[in-house]
Structures are given as structure tokens and as C-alpha cells.
Image (cartoon, rainbow, N blue to C red):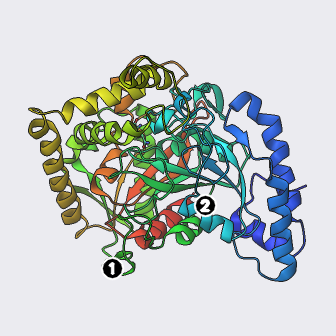
Amino acid sequence: MIDLATLTIEKAHASMQAGEFTARELVEAYLARIKEKNDTINAYLEVYDDVLSQADAADQRFKDGTATLLTGIPIALKDNILVSGKRVSCASKILDGYVGTYTATVVTKLLSEGAVLLGRTNMDEFAMGSSTETSAFGVTKNPHDLSRVAGGSSGGAVAAVAMGGALAALGSDTGGSVRQPASFCGVVGMKPTYGAISRSGLIAMGSSLDQIGPITKTVRDAEILFSALSFHDPMDSTSLPDDMRTVAHTETRKIGVPRDIMSGEGMDAAVFANFKLSLAKLEKAGYVVVPVDLPLMQYSLAVYYVLMPAETSTNLARFDGIRFGYSVPGKTPDEAFAKTRGQGFGKEVRRRIMLGAYVLSHGYYDAYYNKAIAVRRMIEKEFATVFETVDAIATPTSPFPAFKIGEKASDPLAMYLSDIFTVPANIAGIPAISIPAGKTNDGLPLDFQLMTAHACEHTLFKIASLFESLT
Ligand code: GLN
């Protein structure tokens, strides 16, 4: 029996290398778990039909001596990452029947390493949401409590890992969509520096914010995936050049906490108590916790909910019923266009397209869009200045633990507030990680978020690993 609960990438690799089990046996164990759990959890929208042949090819590489650390490692994909010849839907009706015409750079890399792609996982429609409730294919349930959401938008990818249905997964994080569900489901979720991992083949939401990020059980596994997937890609014009991928950081042994959150205001009591406990652990390990002034951080959410819809409304203009998926005929092209988009997109996506079109419209462009861009630059600077004095900034990932299914579904503002601690890292383009950090009395996972300076993933992983090892 393979113990899926404690398996990591390195352990799985060592066991396959030593012949303790084959890639096929490993994948079969995951397929059995998916079969057992997926009907209830709804993490996967599709399990690929070639999983076993992928595993056999991986086994061949172990025999040939060409296996790498990722060979035979079963990985799930969020349903907005393209694989040539495979269905992709962004959990939306509008991509009905759509099949990928090329393969995302991250997937090409995983395939070249011999990783096994298990399938595509549920998400909020076009990655818009924090609960996977906006999916056109039903909500994903939290494996820790079936009456609660798994978080979002990468809820399916995270639940797949948390239920033992994948060793790791790739999600996308525009405003917290890797970290927040990871926090709800008790796994590790990481958002890299903007431009670190190629976005080629990731269906765009907010292009200046989107990053693909690893979802794993351990910090080390996240680091392994980040290292494998972080390289310059000419197919992504925002991909960082080689000489900008790592920036040196002079260690201070200080962890900053934004002064504004030190009172615990706006946080669930259990989250705040746990956050203080997490900081105390780092203090015991030799770090000094200091308050830092980030007075503009509080505007991140407002900036995000102007820039993201603006970019979304532009990016989603291509779904016109002609080139992709779902299509409703009309007497005129305009009518067909309106019907296709009106029926093909769900409510939240339509809300954001309208918001985005509004902030970009003549007369409002300067007041909203340009103002948000200006504030964004100031927030970036504010973070950069603080990182001259601390190694990392700590906050909770989410202000509350996993909420009940339906609890916030009819209140978009309450839902948007769940991004309060995750969005700043996207606005500033800096790396951030959510690490499991205990549980509530009801057994719901709690988290701890760390952010470091631009291209300082080395420091992020170092402190996150240390934190993970502290009991
Ligand atoms: N919850 C945020 C939103 O709804 C983040 C989404 C994301 O990161 N894709 O926009």
C-alpha cells in the first residue's frame, strides 16, 4: 500500500527509483482515490483517458535511466491551462466543447520531465471568485467539511491535493486564487513573482496580475515545482529575463507585520489568535517581529477591483461565439454576439465585464483606470521600501476559515473581502506563499502567509520551510 497521505515528490521519486513501486502503481493509487472521493468533492471536471499510458512512459524512463525528479509524479491542472488536444473550459459554458490547440509552456515542461497529468480541475468561472461556486459545473466541496467551500478560484485543484487525489497541482493566482483555497483546505499554495512562470497557455483573466502557482502538501514540493517551472519563456512577453530572476536580499532576521492588521480588526478571532501564535513560533526560532508601515496596502483591494475587471473585460472580448466553443445564432452578428455572451457567461463574469467596460469607458478612464495604475505604482514602491528593513511580511492568508456553501454567494462584496490579504502581493508583483498553520476547534484548517521582495523566492522558501518545521 502506498501511503498517499505522507507522500511527497522526493519520497515518490526515491521509491520509484528504488523499485518500491512503479509510476503505474502510483497513478493507480491516485485513480482509486479519485474514484472514491470525486463524486462527493467534485474536484476534477475530467480525468484524462491517457493517464495510464503516461505512467507507463514514465516507468520506461526509470528503466532507461532518463528519469528526473518529476518523472511519474501525478499532477492535476486547473481547467484554465491549455493542453493540445484536450478539453479546457475555465468551468464556463461559453467554452462548451472547446479543445486546446496548443500546450501551455508549463505543461510542455512537465511533460518533458515525464510528469503524469491526471486531469483538469474545477474552478470559479474564468477564475472569478473565492469559493468555486461560480463554476458552471457545481461547487467543489471542502474535503475537511463537506458543508463548506474549498475556496477559489483554484478550488478543484486544491481539493484534489487535499483529498489525496493528486500529489500536486497547478493553479492560477490573480488575486489569491492559489493561496486562499490552499488555506481553506490545509495545503501549501504559492504565487510566484510576476513574470517568473510563463503565462503562455494560461487562459488570461487579469494579464498584469495572473501567475501560475504550485499547490502541494509541503513547502519543499512547492519549491521543486517552482524551480522546474521558473525559466524565461519567449512565448510570454512579460516573462522575466534570466538576469532578473533572482534578486539578492541582505538578511535582517526580521519579519514585518503591517501595523494596520496588528489589532486583528476584520479578522475572525480564531484566525487572529492563530496568527499571533505563528508569529511567536518564528520569534522563538530567532526572528524579530516588527510592525511595518504600509499605509497604502489597504487600497490594494480597491485597485484590484478596478484593474482586474478592466483587464478581464478586454481579455474576455475574444469569446464571441465565432472562434471558441458555445455559439447562439442571431439575425445579425451583433445579436449572435449578445446572445452567445449573455447565455454563455455566468452572472459573476458578466458583472466583471460590465465593471471593466465602465472603468475603461471615455470619461471614466482617468478617474478609475489611470488612478488605479498610479496607486498601484505607489503600493509597489511602499513594499520595496519595507523590504529593505525586513526579510518577509507576514499576514494571515484569509481573514476567516472556510465558509459554508452558499454563505457569501449572493453578496459579491463580502466575497471580494476574502481577498484582502492576498491581493496586495498581486498588485505589487511580489512572491507569496500560504502555509498550513493549525486548525480551528472545529477542525478547519488555518494558515500563515509570507511575502518577500520581488524575485526573492529564495528567502520566501527559506522562511516558509523553517515555519513549516516549527511545531
Ligand atoms: N478571489 C479573487 C477574485 O475573485 C481572486 C481570483 C483569482 O486569483 N483568480 O477575483
Q: Is residue 293 visible?
A: no
Tell which circle, 2 or 1, labels the residue nearer the N-terminal end: 2
Type of amino acid at the residue the image marks with label 2: Val
- Secondary structure, mark 1, is loop
Q: Residue at x 44, y 19 (%)?
A: 339
Q: Residue 101 at what x, y percent from top left?
A: 59, 52
Q: Residue 332 at what x, y percent from top left?
A: 39, 20
User: Can you say which quadrant of the picture contains the N terminus?
Assistant: bottom right
Instruction: Please name whichever residue, 95 or 273, is drawn nearer the observer in this view of the structure.
Output: 95
- Secondary structure, mark 2, is helix
The answer to whether 261 is drawn above or below residue 467 in the figure is above
Q: Residue 89 at what x, y percent from top left?
A: 58, 38
Q: Residue at x 59, y 69 (%)?
A: 224
The answer to whether 395 is drawn above or below residue 232 in the figure is above
Disc 2 under 8 Å from ligand 1? The reply is no
Question: Could you classify mark 2 by the number of other residues whose Cα lies within 10 Å: few (under 14), some (14-19), or many (20 or more)?
Answer: many
Mark 2, mark 1: which one is toward the viewer? 2
Identify the disc placed on residue 287.
none
Q: Are marks 2 and 1 in contact (CB under 8 Å)?
A: no
Q: Residue 77 at what x, y percent from top left?
A: 62, 50
Q: Residue at x 33, y 30 (%)?
A: 353
Cα separation between marks 2 and 1 = 29 Å
Question: Could you classify mark 1 by the number of other residues whose Cα lies within 10 Å: few (under 14), some (14-19), or many (20 or more)?
Answer: few
Q: Is residue 345 left or right of residue 292?
A: right
Q: Which residue is mark 1?
A: 248
Type of amino acid at the residue the image marks with label 1: Ala
Q: Which residue is mark 2?
A: 107
Q: Residue 40, located in which quarter of the rendered image?
A: top right
Q: Residue at x 53, y 71 (%)?
A: 227
Q: Is residue 365 left or right of residue 181?
A: left
